[in-house]
Image (cartoon, rainbow, N blue to C red):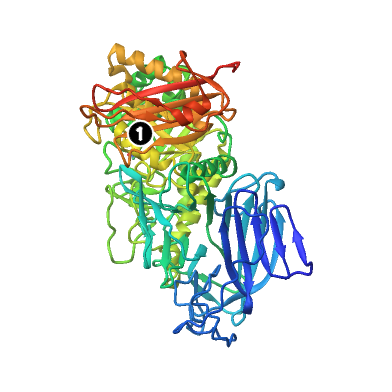
């Protein structure tokens, strides 16, 4: 420890006598300690406290078959049961380690012990990996604790940032090879927390293609549970997020701990409840087939994990993530800008379009108020189907004989912005690029390459591969007037192997790919700050905080069905802000589910995110076109509130046949409520809808006629339509403070 007895920053207290570190901000507290033998321990994480007085000192007890660590010849003290902050395996802790390093002598045993700490105002900028940031050093404080393995002299630096205004702490680890020998990292998690015995449940966001981020809650029992992705991306199947929730958790009540990894590649969450019912949790890069060689004086940093604590249910947890990400993760010119109403031709045409058709579709959108036209897949190479041309990023002259810039001009002349689809990380087997550079696809020598949607994955860990794609994209951006890019990624990785890396570094390929991708995105988004980027991976297959650092919005799902979207958008909103959620009205019968729904519900669901249209509006009836025009007008008047207001979930479509959510302006003078009935039934019970987030003392005008006070609306509530005449209905309520000027 450093020399002062007690150091009191405003957010981080350090007690050098009792050897504790306390991060707190009135919303959350996180306490670390240094135990006997310089072991870094986890003492407390939860509701904010003002001071920590040592109440969580771990009791001394002799546990049979729990050895006493080398150097600590005390039968009452074992690492096997001690709640630690960053445990290793091999000195008596038989639980899962947070770090495993293979050393020159073949051993994997390490023991990282406390050496020193530093405290900084603000948050040091991270290089190469996406992470939360601060512009103003007053908005956060950072604690960095250094541990060392005395035998190898490897150092482990654990960094924690606490934000002044949010119940959130971010953390990551960095391994520094101060030894004289090369080592191999086999596992290095971003976070480990050992919780004492508790009764938390596990909430996770699993899913699948077209059904992303489904909420499920389950009890935790003894043993190990892993949630992971080995797909080379964060995936549709398992979002890199989980939460520990108190039994009976609701939107407004109960304790929740949320954990989100700022990473878009292979990830892993591990929960281990030990025989004493203590819970170890870990999150980080998936160590499955992962290895990283670290030469003397090199460093390796993990992705950042964002931990949010809420004492008031899931609602506050989500609002904390939303605000933190809006203000301290998303960057660039569009960070706080309302997003345009877009129109995308994918479901309107698929690959079957030409210039005339596109112009006509765009025109139909323009008439009704659409602001941005996005030309999706099929405009390049010989791309008339998904079997060809990825990697050949030059215009398809059969479809667009006058070229892209002519089309872009035509769209601009209508007074609309022009957007373009790319899938830069991929290469078609049938492409000029593959003919020329077959070795640029990820592949293992002599094994053949598995196809996914008839395409291979480019080896983005290689600089020359990235450069070639960059040059092609740049040529288009510099000459064709592009205002928006949809960055797609339509298959997961197989045969993960890079011909550029030696055999003993092949375990680095998947992570090097991500680092290459992040470098590419950083360069592109910096060079083209006026382009609005939307990430996509077959819909929401890479909807994660890593991508949001570069691209401020994401195409949420390829499933555009309004009813399916209720669940998808509800689940997504658990972590990710509304301004990031792309949501489009599409044609009926819906192309994914075959369901027929009214324009009204399709509109209300889509305008609960970044509104877009993915159909030929010109083919709609006059009446429907009028409805669309109204939706767009309404959206434009309310999008600031929707995209950047406070979001409250009211009724959960995962547990019932209704859904509802609410947007509230920061000054609480304006609110929008969406209510949806999914399946209708005869003789339905009467349902009361209670609102949230309003000012109790304010009187509100509801839909321009009825008046009620905020406290009434939140506690008394009101009956929703008792007899929706059919399935898939929706009601919208707009609330305005009676004395509001606007
Ligand atoms: C998958 C995307 O999610 C769709 O929206 C569309 O862009 C297709 N790819 C195009 O191939």
Count of residue discs: 1
Q: Residue at x 38, y 67 (%)?
A: 224
Image quarter in which the N terminus is found: bottom right
Residue 319 sits above or below residue 742 on the image: below
Evaluate whether residue 314 shows in this view: yes
Q: Position of residue 316 (x, y in %)?
A: 51, 42
Q: Position of residue 46 (x, y in %)?
A: 56, 55
Q: In front here: 341 or 508?
A: 341
Q: Residue at x 34, y 53 (%)?
A: 492
**Left or right: 354, with 408 as reference point:** left
Q: Position of residue 314 (x, y in %)?
A: 46, 45
Residue furthest bottom in the image: 73
Residue 722 sits above or below residue 386 on the image: above
Image quarter in which the C terminus is found: top right
Evaluate whether residue 373 shows in this view: no
Q: In front here: 723 or 295?
A: 723
Q: In front here: 179 or 677?
A: 677
**Left or right: 650, with 57 as reference point:** left
The residue under label 1 is 659
- Badge 1 marks a residue whose secondary structure is strand
Residue furthest right in the image: 4
Q: In front here: 688 or 23?
A: 688
Q: Residue at x 51, y 48 (%)?
A: 520
Q: Is mark 1 within 8 Å of ligand 1?
A: no
Callout 1: 10 Å neighbours few (<14), some, many (20+)? Answer: many
User: In which of the image's four quarters is ligand 1 placed?
Assistant: top left
Q: Position of residue 242 (x, y in %)?
A: 43, 53
Q: Residue at x 36, y 38 (%)?
A: 652
């Amino acid at each position: 420890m450093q020399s002062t007895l007690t150091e009191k920053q405003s957010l981080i207290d350090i007690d050098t006598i009792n050897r504790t570190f306390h991060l707190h901000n009135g919303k959350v507290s996180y306490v670390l300690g240094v135990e006997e033998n310089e072991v870094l321990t986890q003492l407390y994480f939860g509701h904010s406290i003002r001071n920590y007085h040592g109440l969580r000192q771990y009791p001394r007890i002799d546990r049979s078959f729990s050895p006493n660590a080398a150097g600590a010849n005390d039968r009452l003290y074992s690492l096997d049961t001690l709640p630690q902050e960053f445990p290793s395996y091999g000195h008596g802790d038989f639980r899962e380690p947070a770090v495993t390093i293979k050393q020159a002598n073949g051993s994997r045993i390490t023991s990282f012990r406390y050496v020193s700490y530093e405290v900084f105002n603000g948050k040091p900028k991270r290089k190469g990996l996406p992470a939360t940031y601060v512009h103003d050093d007053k908005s956060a404080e950072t604690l960095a604790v250094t541990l060392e393995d005395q035998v190898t002299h490897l150092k482990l630096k654990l960094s924690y940032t606490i934000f002044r205004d949010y119940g959130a702490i971010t953390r990551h680890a960095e391994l520094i090879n101060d030894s004289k020998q090369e080592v191999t990292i086999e596992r290095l998690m971003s976070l480990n927390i050992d919780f004492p015995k508790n009764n938390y449940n596990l909430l996770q966001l699993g899913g699948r293609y077209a059904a992303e981020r489904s909420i499920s809650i389950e009890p935790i029992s003894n043993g190990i549970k892993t949630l992971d992705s080995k797909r080379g991306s964060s995936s549709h199947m398992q979002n890199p997020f989980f939460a520990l929730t108190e039994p009976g958790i609701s939107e407004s009540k109960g304790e929740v701990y949320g954990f989100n990894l700022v990473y878009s590649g292979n990830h892993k969450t591990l929960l281990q409840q030990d025989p004493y019912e203590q819970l170890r949790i870990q999150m980080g890069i998936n160590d499955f087939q992962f290895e990283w060689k670290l030469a003397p004086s090199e460093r390796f940093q993990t992705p950042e994990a964002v931990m949010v604590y809420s004492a008031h249910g899931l609602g506050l947890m989500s609002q904390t993530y939303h605000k933190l990400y809006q203000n301290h993760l998303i960057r660039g010119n569009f960070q706080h800008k309302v997003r345009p109403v877009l129109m995308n031709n994918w479901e309107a045409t698929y690959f079957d379009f030409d210039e005339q058709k596109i112009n006509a579709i765009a025109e139909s959108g323009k008439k009704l108020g659409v602001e941005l036209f996005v030309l999706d897949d099929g405009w390049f190479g010989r791309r008339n189907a998904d079997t060809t041309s990825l990697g050949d990023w030059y215009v398809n002259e059969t479809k667009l004989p006058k070229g892209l810039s002519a089309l872009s001009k035509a769209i601009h002349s209508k007074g609309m912005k022009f957007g373009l689809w790319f899938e830069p990380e991929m290469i078609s087997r049938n492409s000029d690029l593959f003919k020329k550079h077959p070795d640029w696809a990820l592949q293992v020598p002599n094994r053949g390459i598995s196809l996914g949607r008839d395409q291979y994955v480019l080896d983005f860990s290689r600089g020359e591969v990235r450069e070639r794609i960059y040059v092609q994209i740049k040529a288009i951006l510099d000459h064709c007037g592009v205002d928006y890019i949809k960055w797609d990624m339509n298959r997961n990785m197989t045969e993960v192997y890079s011909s550029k890396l030696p055999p003993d570094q092949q375990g680095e390929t998947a992570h090097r790919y991500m680092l290459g991708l992040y470098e590419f995105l950083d360069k592109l988004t910096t060079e083209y700050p006026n382009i609005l980027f939307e990430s996509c991976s077959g819909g929401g297959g890479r909807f994660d905080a890593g991508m949001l650092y570069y691209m401020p919005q994401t195409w949420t799902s390829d499933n555009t069905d309004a009813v399916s979207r209720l669940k998808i958008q509800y689940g997504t909103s658990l972590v990710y802000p509304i301004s990031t959620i792309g949501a489009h009205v599409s044609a009926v019968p819906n192309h994914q589910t075959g369901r027929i729904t009214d324009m009204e519900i399709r509109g209300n669901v889509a305008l609960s995110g970044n509104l877009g249209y993915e159909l030929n509006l010109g083919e709609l009836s006059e009446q429907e076109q009028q409805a669309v025009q109204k939706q767009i007008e309404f959206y434009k008047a309310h999008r600031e509130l929707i995209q950047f207001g406070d979001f409250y979930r009211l009724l959960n479509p995962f547990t019932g046949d209704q859904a509802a959510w609410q947007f509230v302006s920061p000054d609480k003078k304006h609110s929008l409520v969406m209510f949806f009935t999914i399946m209708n039934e005869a003789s339905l019970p009467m349902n009361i809808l209670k609102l949230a987030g309003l000012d109790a003392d304010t009187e509100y005008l509801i839909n321009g006629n009825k008046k009620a006070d905020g406290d009434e609306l939140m506690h008394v509530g009101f009956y929703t339509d008792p007899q929706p005449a059919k399935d898939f209905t929706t009601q919208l309520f707009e609330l305005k403070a009676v004395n509001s000027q606007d």
